[in-house]
Image (tube, rainbow, N blue to C red):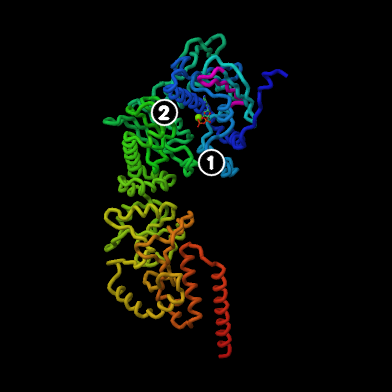
Amino acid sequence: MNADKAMKETRGFQAEVKQLLHLMVHSLYSNKEIFLRELVSNASDACDKLRFEAIGKPELLAEGADFEIRIALDAAARSITISDNGIGMSREEAIEHLGTIAKSGTREFFSALTGDQQKDAQLIGQFGVGFYSAFIVAERLSVLTRRAGSDSAVRWESDGSGEFTIEPAARPARGTDVTLTLKPGEEEFATGIRVRTILRKYSDHIATPIRMKKEVWDKDRAAEVATDEDETVNQASALWARPKGEVTDEQYREFYKHVAHDFTDPLAWTHNRVEGRQEYIQLLYLPARAPFDLWDRKARHGVKLYVRRVFIMDDAGALLPGYLRFVRGIIDSGNLPLNVSREILQESRDVKSIREGAARRVLALLEDLAENRKDDYAKFWTEFGQVLKEGVGEDAENRERIAKLLRFSSTAAEGAGVSLSEYLGRVKEGQKAIYYAVADSLDAARNSPHLEIFRKKGLEVLLLADRVDEWMLSFLHEFDGKPLVSVAKGDLDLGELADAAEKEAREKVAEEFKDLVARVKAALGDAVSDVRVTLRLTDSPACIVVESDAMSRHLQRMLKGAGQNLSEAKPILELNPQHPLVTRLKEESAAGLTDWAQLLLEQATLAEGAPLEDPAAFVRRVNRMLELASKNVLRIKDAERQD
Ligand code: ADP
Ligand code: MG
């Protein structure tokens, strides 16, 4: 056997790559020309990476420091080749980068696919397919690549059906050629006119020159034929460094897709140059959709950092506060040293001022959306609202501004579009607070017994059910001078909203139920910290509240669920003195009272959406009482018959 052949190795794609290839070819077909954008984007990234790596190792540029991307067409062979003289790939890198998907959460992403092609096509765009999109139009893909600083090259080949081969090869200089043999029917991508149009549309913003052979019309052959003359088809200057007026919306959008590795248009962007002690340019985008790994801590977050047009790093998280981690784009600093590292970024005071400036800029962009493009703001809120909420706790300086951007569900409106300002515009005369209810779900919040008195008085209550809500509220004590008050806190004081008659009724009822309250309290013992009567309920017999200054029950449950060891504050049981179940307790015997008291406590716990400590005991109790009740019904019926 030939030694060289023996070194040609066949490997299988990672399972997820196979799935991706299959799905993509079917779902992205209507948008097939984007493969070129993706391959040019990779070529440009490869040049950026080498430009950066060469700062510390100038010898990597021994073959020259002029970067370029070349596109060569061969109509006869039905092929298109995208070449760059960037960083290239070693054998290991080619296997790793072109045979697997390195993103964290990939497996979870694929297991979430539905099998419905239309829906999955949407999702796949959100995932971003990059290199593999070449298989939409190619029946065969060949990548010849040589890592900068190395003498040897490798050839990677695949027909996209599940395997690829890798073998040693020769390439005269560093860089990568990606050659697509087009599927029959896709010949258009080997013609100059078509390819130029695509490049102008999608890749004009690429800062590295993209060159092609100039073509002239050949009368005899009635076709365009390539000449020896080179032609640059893009503007080849950093888009963010151009004056705003010279960049079209289309170019901004395409640039976003390149930096964010996203297939969808961005929702909005902000582009400006900051001068002063720190000089930098920022071009920041709001994506239209949350990436599938928004909640994955290991996922890429943040923006690209450039220093004086030189690419430094992807995902520079330190350039934006954590609660704006969904923002994509670039920041190009005029002051930072070229050899800046992630560690330096974390601690640098200069970076701190860039970060603060960027945060203000993004907040201004959000304010503008909220004010002038309400539908788009609603979209933003659905995708990223939960992340923005973290800012209330994280960014004390901008807390007010962020609070204004919050949106809530409420008892007065469907959907999640109520702002605090809107709420304040609707407060009743004499209302001194902004009321809210937190529960595990919006339905649980909406149906909470705590809302009964608010409904009766026509007071609006904000409904919250996101995981971050309680935490956020612990930083947001007031808005526009009005305190935020939980409807589940004890001793609910509606202030002037309770009229004199109600106050009197309250005192009277407290007196009237003094004995019963004491007996119920004795019966429940350790399970509660207090029992009292309340006028906050209209329909339910009982509810649970906490002391005004105690941690809410919902938060206690969340912390416990997260494994935190905390001594649980005992609940207060409030009884509705108008409810028949409560009034008839006065006549109950000691034994019966214990059962009823337990049942009321358990009911109130369930109504909060909280689990019971001993569900089996609850079921036994309910059954025992139902049995008793049905016996009573029979007895009454018997008595009626005898009458
Ligand atoms: P992404 O660009 O989002 O990282 P891609 O699927 O487009 O994902 O590319 C996968 C990886 O393959 C890149 O991250 C890079 O490491 C490598 N790669 C692709 N094209 C090239 C190229 N022309 N030169 C060097 N590396 C490349
Ligand atoms: Mg890419």
Using the rendered view, name the quadrant where residue 579 is placed: bottom left
- Residue occupied by mark 2: 312
Q: Residue at x 42, y 67 (%)?
A: 571
Amino acid at pointer 2 = Ile
- Relative to 508, does residue 451 appear above or below in the rendering? above
- Residue occupied by mark 1: 105
Q: Quadrant of the C terminus?
A: bottom right
Is residue 295 in view from this perspective?
yes
Mark 2, residues whose alpha carbon is within 10 Å: few (<14), some, or many (≥20)?
many
Mark 2 CB in 8 Å range of ligand 1?
A: no
Q: Is residue 264 left or right of residue 344?
A: right
- The stretch of residues the image draws in magenta is 137-151
Is residue 82 in view from this perspective?
no
Q: Position of residue 558 (x, y in %)?
A: 46, 56
Q: Quadrant of the N terminus?
A: top right
Amino acid at pointer 1 = Gly
Q: Is mark 1 on a helix, strand or loop?
A: loop
Task: Indicate whether residue 640 is drawn in magenta.
Answer: no
Task: Give me the disc on residue 84.
Answer: none
Marks 2/1 in contact by CB < 8 Å: the verdict is no
- The one nearer the camera, 589 or 402, is 589
Q: Residue at x 44, y 40 (%)?
A: 288
Mark 1, residues whose alpha carbon is within 10 Å: few (<14), some, or many (≥20)?
some
Spatial CA distance of label 2 from label 1 is: 25 Å
Direction bottom: furthest residue: 643
- The one nearer the camera, 383 or 83, is 83
- Relative to 93, does residue 551 appear above or below in the rendering? below
